[in-house]
Structures are given as structure tokens and as C-alpha cells.
Image: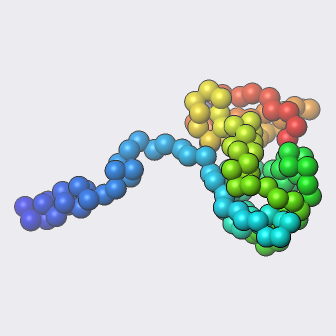
Amino acid sequence: MAEYEKMLENAYATLPKKALEHERFEIPRVESFIQGSKTIVPGFNALIKEIRRDEKHLLKYLTKETGTSITKGNSQLTINGKVGAIQLNKLIQNYFNQFVLCPECKKPDTKIIAQKETKMMKCEACGAMRPVKGI
Ligand SMILES: [Zn+2]
């Protein structure tokens, strides 16, 4: 038993520090690269899954903000223009702050619910509700 406990202790000690920290949410990032005059963003579905929003809405947002047109393949975006990775992630961050993150508790556990004519963002973590425009 003592051996077993010692083993556990060792395993715990070698865990990366991050795993032991209180769960902290990081804004999702995407990888992208420029190909000719286009920007390719693979792994877009993973982002959508993480932020739990309608992909059409995010695409509309990105299209507007980058002033380009965007086509989506299986899980890959093709932006018809050159958009740097920093700029792209900044846009995603803005989107995230505006449409996903709870302004009260700063957690991303929110969902969009329709209340009559108004769309509300409801936080499942703290219960806060606020109207969101343009979603
Ligand atoms: Zn909240």
C-alpha cells in the first residue's frame, strides 16, 4: 500500500502544472496560412465546436470584418484574400468576447436563446442574461 501511495505521489508530482491549476478558459486559436492570394484555415470545425455558435454567423462576421468572401470545405475555410494569422485570431477573439464570453463571470458556458424578438445570451455558469444584437 505504501508503495502504491508513493507511486501516486510521484505521478501527481510529474503532472504538468497546468493540469493542476483551476480550470481557466483560453480563447480558442486557429492556425492559418497564406496560399497564393488566399488564406487557408484548416480545422475550422474544431473552433466551432469549442465556441458552440452557429458557424454561419461566425462566417458572416469574418466575411464582414475581413472584407473578403469566404468559402468553407469540409472543415477548412478559404478566405479569398490575405489575412494574417494575428489579425484572424484577433477577429476570433473579438467575436468570442462579443458573442460567447459571459460578461459577468467571464466563462464561455453560454448559449443563445430567443426571447420573443430578442436574442439573449444566457450563461449556464452564473445565470446572467443579456441581449445580444446581430446574432
Ligand atoms: Zn456567467
**Residue at the location (65% across, 33% down)?**
102
Which image quadrant: the C terminus? top right
Point 92% across, 32% down: residue = 117
Residue 108 place in picture, x, y as percent: 62, 41
Q: Position of residue 34 (x, y in %)?
A: 76, 65
Nearest to the observer: residue 120 or residue 87: 87
Q: Up-down: is 120 above or below 38?
A: above
Q: Is residue 45 visible?
A: no
8 on left or right of 130? left
What quarter of the picture does the N terminus occupy?
Answer: bottom left
For residue 69, what is the image quadrant?
bottom right
Q: Residue furthest left?
A: 2
| Front residue of this view, candidates 22 and 129 | 22
- Residue 108 in view, yes or no: yes
Farthest-out residue, front:
36
Q: Which of these two is toward me, 114 or 133? A: 133
Q: Quadrant of residue 47?
A: bottom right
62 to the left or right of 31 = right
Query: Looking at the picture, does residue 7 appear above or below residue 114?
Result: below
The residue sitting at 66% across, 61% down in the picture is: 31
Residue 29 position, x and y percent, is: 63, 53
Q: Is residue 70 above or below residue 99?
A: below
- In this view, the residue in front, 13 or 122, is 13
Q: From the top left corner, tell me how far across and down residue 39 is, in percent.
A: 80, 63
Residue at 26 percent of width and 59 percent of height: 14
Query: Which scheme is used to colour this image of the protein?
Result: rainbow
Q: Quadrant of ligand 1?
A: top right
